[in-house]
């Protein structure tokens, strides 16, 4: 198919097959393709996905920007057309846009966002120039004339815009692919280091962010030899593998790109997807057309995860091949890599260690967008835990000492969010029922007494995973000094023993009908020594 600029592909636009003879011919062709091996199997699966196999609403926006002045790029339009065709084969209604100016790019993103809902599987693929500035990534329209860093937010399109639309729509699956790490001519016009490569961003819940190369790095536009970038060529090849979980699919792409580029380019992903997703579902046992098992696909999947240190990789294999050739080995690896199902965590295990790091998403009712904060243990002393804190709000590194006792812990010189409550409480208090005493905090200029209650254990799902956590609630009431009526505050804290720190923290305070505080901390990732 030849894709024209501004064209739109949809699965529904293909002419329907007419007559029983056409359907018999299609069934015969499907069987022939299955006999051709892995390529035929992938095509057959793609054909099924154009039928009743896909129940969710699959939509994709594909943008290729190449006609930059005075230095156009070679591959982005070809890459966009290739990925557009591939996504169409995977059952997506694809909107292809090429060489967009800023106004047209904004319109395309806005229209795409308007199509999203809770039943949507959404994919955004962008090929072209992009730059980072102060932890934000900006896609660059072809009519941009950026002369200094201050013009980037004005002339570029902030990726946070579409991420916010995805978050509001609560789409079931969101996948954003940035094939946008090309050699950047805008860097030559500015001395700012912020223009090198793209910035690492945390994926909102239900979202996977894929970068053609690691954050902060670049890859040449012309490194491919087929009229496409290496990344887009490998992505198109692996995307249609039946039953392949998307995280493992991107791992295969990464391995191939690293090999083909001789380690000059290393793709990278950040995922907060919940549940499993494959671009092409596995073969349905109730399918009208029986197909032989694809031993090659199983072997390839096992080879891609055999050295993994993640139990979830082997669980994904077992879901796809519960009676496969490597099933026993996979179960053994799951058992070896999973934490013990029983047995209490000892106080020693609850103590943080130097180098332990946690990253949180902070969502505030009064703040536009999300704020990310990172805490790192620098020392463990008798007086408490010495931490360094960094935030995406500014470039400062803050030091704080968190006492190993109940209480609120405000960060020095930072009032963008309420203080945490005893983030390391479990290092002394191991669970439900421990008495921690009443707590006090000044809210809306009124000193308040807060009564704590342990409310048992519950499962908590955050971007970093699913955890069994102890739930602590602190509640208090008072009278507003401003005459706004009764003042009420509630703090809910979830402690997961295996994380060594809080995994979630919700703050709410009202004065009459006026909301004074409404903030949530959620763990997005962590690393324990």
Image: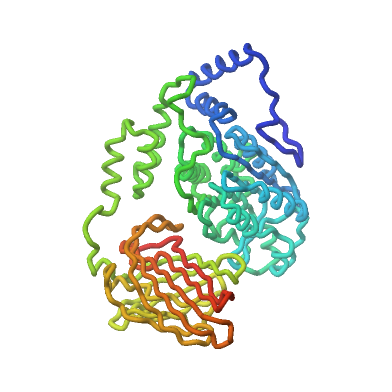
| Residue 330 located left or right of residue 82 | left
Report the label total: 0
Question: Among all residues in the image, which is located at the extreme top?
Answer: 21
Q: Position of residue 351 (x, y in %)?
A: 29, 70
Question: Among all residues in the image, which is located at the extreme front?
Answer: 485
Q: How is the image coloured?
A: rainbow
Residue 529 visible in rendering: no
Quarter of the figure that contains the N terminus: top right
Q: Residue at x 53, y 25 (%)?
A: 44
Quarter of the figure that contains the C terminus: bottom left
Q: Residue at x 63, y 66 (%)?
A: 133
Looking at the image, which is closer to me, 368 or 441? 441
Q: Position of residue 178 (x, y in %)?
A: 60, 51
Looking at the image, which is closer to me, 186 or 330? 330
| Residue 334 located left or right of residue 295 | left
| Residue 432 located left or right of residue 284 | left
Q: Residue at x 29, y 50 (%)?
A: 337
Q: Residue at x 60, y 32 (%)?
A: 89
Q: Position of residue 126 (x, y in %)?
A: 64, 48
Residue 6 visible in rendering: yes
Looking at the image, which is closer to me, 196 or 13? 13
Looking at the image, which is closer to me, 68 or 380? 380
Q: Position of residue 38 (x, y in %)?
A: 48, 26
């Amino acid at each position: 198919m030849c894709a024209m600029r501004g064209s739109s592909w949809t699965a529904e636009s293909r002419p329907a097959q007419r007559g029983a003879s056409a359907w018999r011919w299609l069934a015969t062709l499907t069987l022939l393709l299955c006999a051709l091996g892995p390529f035929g199997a992938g095509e057959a699966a793609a054909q099924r996905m154009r039928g009743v196999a896909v129940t969710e609403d699959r939509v994709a926006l594909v943008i290729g920007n190449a006609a930059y002045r005075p230095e156009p790029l070679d591959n982005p339009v070809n890459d966009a057309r290739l990925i557009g065709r591939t996504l169409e084969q995977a059952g997506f209604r694809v909107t292809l846009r090429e060489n967009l100016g800023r106004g047209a790019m904004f319109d395309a993103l806005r229209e795409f966002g308007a199509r999203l809902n809770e039943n949507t599987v959404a994919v955004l693929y962008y090929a072209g120039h992009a730059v980072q500035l102060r932890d934000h990534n900006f896609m660059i329209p072809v009519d941009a004339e950026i002369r200094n860093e201050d013009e980037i937010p004005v002339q570029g399109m902030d990726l946070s815009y579409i991420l916010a639309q995805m978050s509001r729509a609560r789409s079931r699956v969101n996948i954003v692919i940035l094939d946008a790490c090309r050699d950047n001519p805008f860097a030559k016009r500015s001395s700012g280091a912020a223009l090198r490569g793209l910035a690492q961003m945390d994926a909102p819940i239900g979202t996977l962010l894929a970068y053609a190369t690691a954050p902060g790095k670049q890859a040449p536009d012309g490194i491919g030899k087929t009229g496409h970038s290496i990344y887009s060529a490998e992505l198109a090849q692996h995307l249609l593998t039946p039953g392949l979980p998307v995280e493992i699919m991107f791992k295969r792409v990464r391995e191939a790109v690293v090999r083909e580029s001789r380690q000059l380019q290393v793709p990278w992903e950040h995922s907060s997807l919940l549940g499993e997703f494959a671009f092409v579902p596995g073969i349905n046992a109730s399918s009208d057309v029986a197909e032989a098992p694809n031993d090659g696909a199983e072997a390839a999947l096992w080879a891609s995860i055999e050295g993994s240190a993640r139990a979830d990789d082997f669980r994904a294999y077992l879901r796809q091949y519960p009676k496969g050739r490597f099933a026993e080995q996979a179960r053994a690896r799951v058992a070896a890599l999973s934490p013990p199902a029983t047995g209490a965590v000892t106080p020693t295990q609850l103590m943080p260690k130097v180098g332990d790091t946690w990253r949180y998403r902070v969502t505030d009712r009064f703040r536009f967008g999300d704020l990310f904060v990172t805490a790192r243990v620098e020392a463990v002393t008798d007086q408490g835990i010495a931490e360094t804190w960094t935030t995406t709000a500014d470039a400062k590194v803050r030091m704080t000492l968190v006492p190993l006792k109940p209480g609120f812990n405000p960060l020095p010189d930072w009032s963008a969010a309420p203080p945490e409550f005893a983030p390391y409480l479990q290092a002394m208090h191991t669970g439900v029922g421990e008495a921690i005493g009443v707590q006090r905090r000044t809210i809306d200029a009124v000193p308040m007494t807060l009564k704590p209650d342990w409310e048992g254990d519950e499962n908590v799902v955050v971007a970093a995973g699913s955890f069994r956590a102890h739930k602590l609630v602190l509640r208090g009431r008072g009278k507003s000094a401003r005459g706004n009526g009764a003042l009420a505050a509630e703090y809910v804290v979830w402690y997961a023993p295996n994380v060594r720190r809080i995994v979630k923290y919700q703050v709410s305070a009202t004065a009459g009908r006026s909301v004074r505080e409404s903030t949530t901390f959620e763990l997005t990732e962590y690393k324990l020594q």
